[in-house]
Amino acid sequence: MKAILSGNEAVARGCYESGLHIATAYPGTPSTEILENITQYPEIKAQWAPNEKVAFEVAMGACFEGARTLVAMKHVGLNVAADPFMSVSLIGAPGGLIVVTADDPGMHSSQNEQDNRTYAKFAGYPCFEPADSQESKDFIAEALRISIEYDVPVLYRMTTRICHSKGIVELGDRVDYPISGFQPDPKKFVVLPAHARVRRHWALERLHRLTEYAEITPLNTIETGSRPIGVITNGISYQYVCEIMPDVSILKLGVSYPLPMQKIQQFAQSVDQLFVIEELEPFIEDQILAAGIACQGKQFWPTTGEFTPDIVQIGFVKAGVLKETSAFVKPEEVIARPPIFCPGCPHRAVYVALNKLKATVSSDIGCYTLGALPPLSATDTCVEMGASIGVAVGMATARGSGKGIVATIGDSTFMHSGMTGLLNAVTQNAGITVVILDNSITAMTGGQHHPGTGKNLDGRSSKPVEFAKLCQSLGVDRIKVIDPYDLIQTQEVLKAEMETDTLSVVLTNRPCALYPPENRKKVLQVPFHVNTDVCIGCHACFRVSCPAISEADTKTKKGLTQSCIDPQLCTGCSVCAQVCPVQAIQRVNHE
Ligand SMILES: Cc1ncc(C[n+]2csc(CCOP(=O)(O)OP(=O)(O)O)c2C)c(N)n1
């Protein structure tokens, strides 16, 4: 049977067919749909974790028990999980462990760009890199086989284009395996220095054996072309090379670490010119050059950004092996559509208020990061998940006062890595204001549950974290709850808290307008409209940055363009009505 699957759907299917027992993850684009799709296979126990480190640790424990396990995350998630990721290299993966890293070349939806193949080299793991949906499914079985046979976790590197592109996939049946059970062995599982020193030698010897595997695996294949040009490539770049240069010889690396250097040497000898075409870092190229084999790559193809067929083509033109061609016409410029808070988003008023109060805002990562964009422009720093509170404490320490310093953090991000930052704020007696933007969901990645929502991935109820009680138990004495649809209350509370040099937590209490989807009905109240008899065309309502509000065709007597509200988009949250100086924004049934 065949199906059209995205790379992420194919990974999920591969897990099913390969008898996977347990899968864990923390959401993050472009990896999120892997775990979401695994839930359609009840044979696999799937769990969200509060962050990638915990997801990784749960996966490790399952694999120590002999379960076939997968943990998935976006590329920056591996930074969070890097501690166990590095150490478990010395222990191994008795049940089989696949670590999916979904890298995001070009930063479609990420705060940075990093090539996580370097993590494979760092930890001494083999790195598998599928180049399409079929391989995304098929490589799972092989990765598990290698993980178990060599007692090593496998880094399974996807990229945005592989995760989200769809292709035809030949499906297979599930093969079931028993969970073998934990085999106690303290010298293996307890990484005391004395044990770890011994295991380090074992890991190096394992890497040597993995190199022998890389030489013979059919995942590293040579496709002989008619021209004496050779290209070594991996992942999505392989597809572009096939498209642009169908007549060259290709060494396609499905296992990009450790490298099959003998195979590469032979391939190099069989061609007149050797190119390495890989997105992001010169990971393969540098190792080939270090082995004394001549090749070219990064002088023709960029080290940053996502490749496209025309980027690959331009590189070949620069390298002088392809004549300039107009085959890839530059696409017409697409009008920019900067992201914006949704209509009814409970984060909006907080940023309207913070802008007005001229707070120094140390923000975090989530939908609310949009508060940085004009016209709200109310964010001064944003670095990585969980950073907001620590950065605010650092600023307050440097200034000698926390007055006017506000850390904003979402509920999922607070669960992920904000709690320890708040604990530190208590310990340091930092007089900052922490706003926990609790919309009761992980909205930015498409509405996943977290420990504060009271639901598990499989729909089972769990005990929801109570944020106020949690903050109190961490030692915060001043805790305020605000309705973020009430702009005046929001502004007054924030102003008062910013003026004191005492640590306080302000909790918002409105759910996301989009997720879970049931909310869309709940939030939808009577929409607002602009009364054109009253509107003076001042455009104060534009400053709340709502996509439901735009310029109308109508004008005031003075010739100023009035505003209008799209009733299909308006949720009736009322924030715009509260900033209108002449009460021209009224509920539709007002008259
Ligand atoms: C380390 C890391 N993991 C995952 C992500 C992807 N991601 C970005 S924001 C976010 C959570 C957003 O949830 P929340 O803080 O509740 O804010 P909301 O979007 O709901 O407003 C996630 C999972 C990331 N950027 N970095």
Image: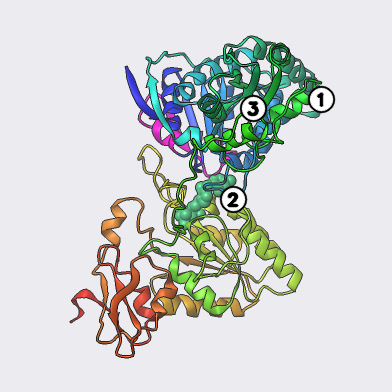
In front of the other: label 1 or label 3?
3
Please identify, in this view, whether the residue under mark 2 or under mark 3 is nearer the observer: 3
In the rendering, at what x and y percent does residue 179 appear? 49, 17
**Label 1 crowding class (10 Å Cα cut-off): few <14, some 14-19, many 20+?**
few
Image check: 557 left or right of 201? Answer: left
Asked whether residue 36 is drawn in magenta, I would say yes
Instruction: Say what secondary structure mark 2 lies in.
Output: loop
478 magenta-colored: no
Percent across and percent down for residue 156 are 57, 27
Camera-nearest residue between 412 and 188: 412
**What residue sits right under mark 1 in the picture?**
194
Q: Nearer the viewer, residue 254 or 191?
A: 254
Q: Amino acid at mark 3?
A: Val
Mark 2 or 1, which is nearer the eye? 2
Which quarter of the image is occupied by the C terminus? bottom left
Name the spot of residue 384 as percent of width and height, x first: 61, 52
Query: Residue at coordinates 75% horizontally, 29% vertically from top-left?
Result: 286
Image disc number at residue 111 = 2
Residue 412 seen in render: no
Estimate the spatial distance between the alpha carbons at disc 1 and disc 3, rounded to whole Å: 55 Å
Would you name the residue on which mark 3 appears? Answer: 321
Residue shown at 62% from the left, 31% from the top:
316
Q: Nearer the N terminus, badge 2 or badge 3?
A: 2
Q: Amino acid at mark 2?
A: Gln
The residues tagged by marks 2 and 1 sit, at their Cα atoms, a distance apart of: 39 Å
**Distance of label 2 from label 3 (alpha carbons):** 36 Å
Q: Quadrant of residue 305?
A: top right
